Amino acid sequence: MPLQGNLRNFSTTQLLNLINLAGKTGTLTIFEGIPTGEKDAMQEEKMAAGAERAKVSFKAGKLIFAMMEGQDGNLVSVLNKAGKLTDEQARIIRERAKNTADKALAMLLINANYVTQNDVVNSIQQHTLDVIYNLMSWTQGPFRFDDGILPGADRILVPIDLENVIIEGSRRIREVEELNKHLPNLDMALKFPENPKEKFKGINLSVEEWRVVSFINPRNTIRQIAKANNMSEMEIRRIVYGLEQAGLVELVKPATPDGVKGAAAANAQSRLQQRRQQAAKPQVQKAVVSKLIDKIRSI
């Protein structure tokens, strides 16, 4: 019988500890909670399992796979997110190899000298860790652990020891709490400060930071920027916090082209853009210094 419960009573960290100590093999699924109208023994409302929110798989107590609903976790997206494939390369590969399994695609990319084997392994490992660290901050939701259930054979599985994951995840939970306090609303937007050329002079940013910078525009909410870059809330909060502390961006209310501001207006504009072009990416703010634009394009 599968292990079942709710994260409000048995946290993700406790589940990882149990799986690690018991050397379990199987898949942990976390669901959306649907209120049942009934009370449990602690007089809290019982939650039925709804749509799947995330899946995490383990083999002999090691983390081997993690994915979240709504996040594209295929190999091309993972390599693109890690900066190993450019946006244009990723677009072309998706079109030409859309029905190719990850393992076969990895061999094709390695043989074509797009990436190395280390690029593939390290990018998948980092993606898996990003997902699990995000899940460790969740505080509620029904879950189920199914023994012996593993991802399909087409997936590339990279074993990761859980001990360090648990330690690092606990540290990040404390960090997330601070980031949530600092940036509670992802429906805010960002803008560049005055004299951006002087601010960015001599600054060395990561690939992920450059991508966020390229989408900065008062019409784009932080949530939209995260979605366009396939980032979790934790990732986008950390990057925005770092950019803000460095004086490179400022928080503002989102604005529509006619000057009307507010989250509702921004959402309406987003829906309009989505109807015009699916998965359309926000435009780079024209006021950004030309050197910054050239740098972004060269990534």
Image: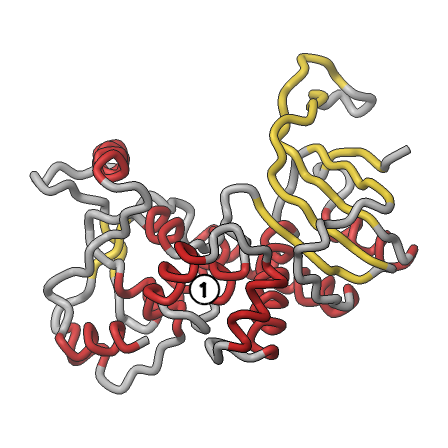
Q: Quadrant of the C terminus?
A: bottom left
The image position of residue 62, as x and y in percent, is 80, 62
Residue at the limit of the structure toward the top, as seen here:
37
Q: Quadrant of the N terminus?
A: top right
When the figure is inspected, residue 87 is found, relative to residue 279, above or below; the finding is below
The image position of residue 145, as x and y in percent, is 80, 41
Q: Who's the residue at 40% across and 75% down the image?
A: 206
Which quadrant holds residue 239?
Answer: bottom left
The answer to whether residue 91 is seen in the rendering is yes
> On the picture, is 130 further left or further right than 238?
right
Dot 1: element: helix
To which residue does mark 1 refer? 81
Q: Who's the residue at 67% across and 12% down the image?
A: 37
Q: Residues within 10 Å of mark 1 (few under 14, many from 20)?
A: many
Q: Nearer the viewer, residue 287 or 293?
A: 293
Which quadrant holds residue 257?
Answer: top left
Q: Who's the residue at 48% across and 69% down the image?
A: 82
> On the picture, is 72 further left or further right than 206?
right
The color scheme shown is secondary structure
The image position of residue 147, as x and y in percent, is 86, 44
When the figure is inspected, residue 62 is found, relative to residue 31, above or below; the finding is below
> On the picture, is 298 further left or further right than 65?
left
Q: Who's the residue at 37% across and 69% down the image?
A: 86
Q: What is the three-letter code of the residue carrying label 1?
A: Lys
Q: Nearer the viewer, residue 168 or 70?
A: 70
